[in-house]
Image (cartoon, helix red, strand yellow):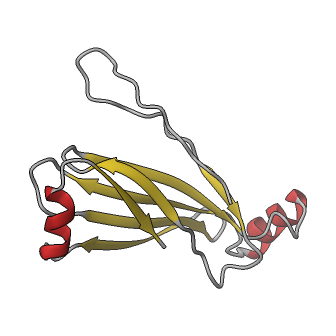
Amino acid sequence: YRILSHILVKEGDQEQTAKQEMQTVYLDSRAERAFTFSLWAKTDKDIKVELKLSWDCFSTTMSQEELAREVREKGEDKLPIEASFKLLRRQGEMAFFVRYKEDRRTDNYKLHRSRTWDWRDKGDQTIKNILNHKGWAYFSFV
């Protein structure tokens, strides 16, 4: 369990930006990769969030030398999986867009594999009620 917080800063006339930092999650196996993400956001403003993740499933059970040998000599898929979770809602639109993307290097860095999951809400009345509310809302993704 960890709490992430980003302080948004104004840089001249550019829009607000946050420094992106990779969050490494150590797991026992690759069988299940899951996380819970929550945030408070103003519903009458843009929502732009990107969470960068690294799923590390082998460095806790193997030394760096063993891991390098498995990847280099045997071509094992044991390198960390780089992932990103994006949440976007443009001001004035009545819809959310969510994207989860995983990138991994395999076969001794010769192949690059990528998987992407996209979700866009249906714009039903529940979402419209949330977005028409002029205040703060709490969002949670499991």
Q: Nearer the viewer, residue 64 or 118?
A: 118
Q: Quadrant of residue 14?
A: top left
Say above or below: 37 vs 117: above
Q: Residue furthest left?
A: 92
Between 116 and 3, the residue placed more toward the observer is 3
> Quadrant location of residue 8?
top left
Question: What residue lies at 41% left-to-right and 67% top-to-bottom?
Answer: 100
Q: Judge from the rendering whether residue 121 lies leftward or rightward of residue 2; answer left or right.
A: left
Query: Eyeballing the image, is 7 above or below 76?
Result: above
Judge left or right: residue 28 versus residue 134. right
Q: Nearer the viewer, residue 9 or 135?
A: 135
Residue at 14 percent of width and 66 percent of height: 128
Residue placed at 60% from the left, 76% from the top?
33
Q: Is residue 107 left or right of residue 118?
A: right
Residue 71 image position (x, y, % from top left): 74, 68
Residue 138, position as x, y percentages in the image: 38, 58
**Residue 135 placed where, x, y %?**
25, 47
Residue 50 is left or right of residue 90, and the answer is right
Q: Position of residue 63 (x, y in %)?
A: 90, 61
Look at the picture and state if 28 lies above or below 128.
Answer: below
Q: In the figure, 113 relative to 47: above or below?
A: below
All told, the count of numbered labels is 0
Q: Residue furthest top?
A: 12
State the residue at coordinates (61%, 50%).
3
Quick one: quadrant of the N terminus?
bottom right
